[in-house]
C-alpha cells in the first residue's frame, strides 16, 4: 500500500470509482388541516387532516400518487435545501415548518437505480397555500386504524379513495422502533405509503409535548377549533379540562371575536410564542 506524506497528496491520488454510486432524494409529507362544510350551522366546521400528493405523469409508477420530492444536487445543496426547493416549487412558500423524518433506503424502493430518500415532514396552514402543480391534490386522512400491529390508512380527495395497510414489525433490540412492511398498496408510488405512516405517527407523538400544531393554525382561532385539530391528529376525543391543561401555556386570549355563524360569539386566541 502506498504511503502518503499529506492529505492533499492522498486526495489527489484517490479513486472514487472503486465504490458504487447512488442517488439521493428529499421527499416531503406536507400536512395541513382542512375544514369540511358543516351540516349544522350551530356547530364548528369539521376538521380533517390533509396530505398533499402528486399524480405521476411518467414512468416509473405512471398514474400513481406520490409525495412531493426531488433529486439532490450533490454539488450545490444539502438534503434540507433540496427539500425547501421542492416545497417552494410545490407551494410557492419559503417559510414552511420543516423537520427531518427518516431515511428510507430499501434496496428495491426505486426500480430505476439505487436511490436513498431522506424524508421530511412539513406543516402548513392550508389557507396560505396555493399549489401550482398541475397534478397535485389534497387528500383527507379519512381513517387510521391499527389492529395487531397492522395499520390501515384511508385517504380521499372526494374523486378518488386510496387505502393501504402496513405491518409494524418491532426491530430487534428496540422497544419502540419498527420496521414498516407494506401489506396492501396499489395506488401509492415507491415506498411513500411508509413515509405517510411515519409522518402521521411523528405528528401524533409530538403534539402533546411540543408546539408543533400551531404551524397548521391561522393566526387567530377559537379554542373549539384548536381542540378539534388536536382530536383529529390524536384520533380521539379530549375532555375539555384535559385539553385546557395541554394548551394552558401555549395560547393567549385576544380581544377579537368570531361572530356571524349562527352561534354565540367566541373569543379568538393566538399562539403565545416563548420569548426565551
Image: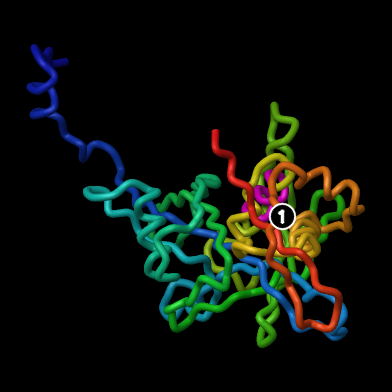
Q: Return the x and y of residue 42 as percentages of the image width and height.
A: 87, 80
Residue ID at (38%, 65%): 88
Q: Return the x and y of residue 104 as percentages of the image width and height.
A: 52, 48
Answer with left or right where residue 198 lies relative to residue 113.
Answer: right
Q: Return the x and y of residue 191 as percentages of the image width and height.
A: 56, 59
**Residue topped by disc 1:** 253
- Quadrant of residue 11 in the image? top left
Give 94 or 271, whichever is nearer the viewer. Answer: 271
Residues in magenta? Answer: 198-206
Coloring applied to the structure = rainbow
- Quadrant of residue 150 in the image? bottom right
Q: Quick check: 228 above or below 120?
A: below
Q: Is residue 152 visible?
A: no
Residue ID at (72%, 42%): 249
Residue ID at (64%, 52%): 271
Magenta-colored segment: predominant secondary structure: helix
Answer with left or right where residue 240 lies relative to residue 23.
Answer: right
Answer with left or right where residue 11 lies relative to residue 209.
Answer: left
Q: Return the x and y of residue 75 as percentages of the image width and height.
A: 22, 48
Q: Is residue 155 visible?
A: yes
Amino acid at each position: 500500500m502506498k504511503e502518503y506524506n499529506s492529505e492533499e497528496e492522498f486526495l489527489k491520488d484517490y479513486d472514487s470509482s472503486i465504490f458504487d454510486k447512488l442517488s439521493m432524494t428529499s421527499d416531503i409529507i406536507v400536512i395541513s388541516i382542512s375544514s369540511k362544510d358543516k351540516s349544522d350551522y350551530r356547530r364548528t366546521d369539521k376538521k380533517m387532516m390533509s396530505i398533499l400528493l402528486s399524480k405521476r405523469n411518467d414512468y416509473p409508477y405512471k398514474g400513481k400518487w406520490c409525495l412531493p420530492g426531488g433529486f439532490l444536487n450533490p454539488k450545490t445543496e444539502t438534503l434540507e435545501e433540496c427539500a425547501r426547493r421542492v416545497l417552494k416549487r410545490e407551494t410557492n412558500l419559503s417559510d414552511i415548518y420543516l423537520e427531518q423524518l427518516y431515511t428510507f433506503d430499501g434496496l428495491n424502493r426505486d426500480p430505476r437505480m439505487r436511490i436513498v430518500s431522506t424524508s421530511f415532514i412539513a406543516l402548513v396552514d392550508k389557507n396560505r397555500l396555493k399549489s401550482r402543480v398541475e397534478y397535485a391534490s389534497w387528500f383527507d386522512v379519512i381513517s387510521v386504524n391499527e389492529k395487531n400491529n397492522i395499520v390501515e390508512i384511508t385517504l380521499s380527495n372526494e374523486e378518488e379513495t386510496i387505502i393501504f395497510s402496513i405491518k409494524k414489525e418491532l426491530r430487534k433490540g428496540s422497544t419502540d422502533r419498527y420496521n414498516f412492511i407494506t401489506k396492501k398498496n396499489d395506488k401509492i408510488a415507491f415506498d411513500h405509503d411508509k413515509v405517510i405512516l411515519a409522518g402521521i405517527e411523528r405528528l401524533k407523538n409530538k403534539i402533546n409535548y411540543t408546539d408543533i400544531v400551531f404551524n397548521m393554525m391561522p393566526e387567530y382561532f377559537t379554542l373549539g377549533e384548536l381542540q378539534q385539530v388536536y382530536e383529529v391528529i390524536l384520533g380521539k376525543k379530549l375532555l375539555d379540562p384535559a385539553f385546557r391543561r395541554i394548551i394552558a401555556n401555549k395560547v393567549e386570549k385576544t380581544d377579537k371575536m368570531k361572530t356571524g355563524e349562527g352561534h354565540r360569539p367566541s373569543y379568538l386566541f393566538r399562539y403565545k410564542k416563548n420569548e426565551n
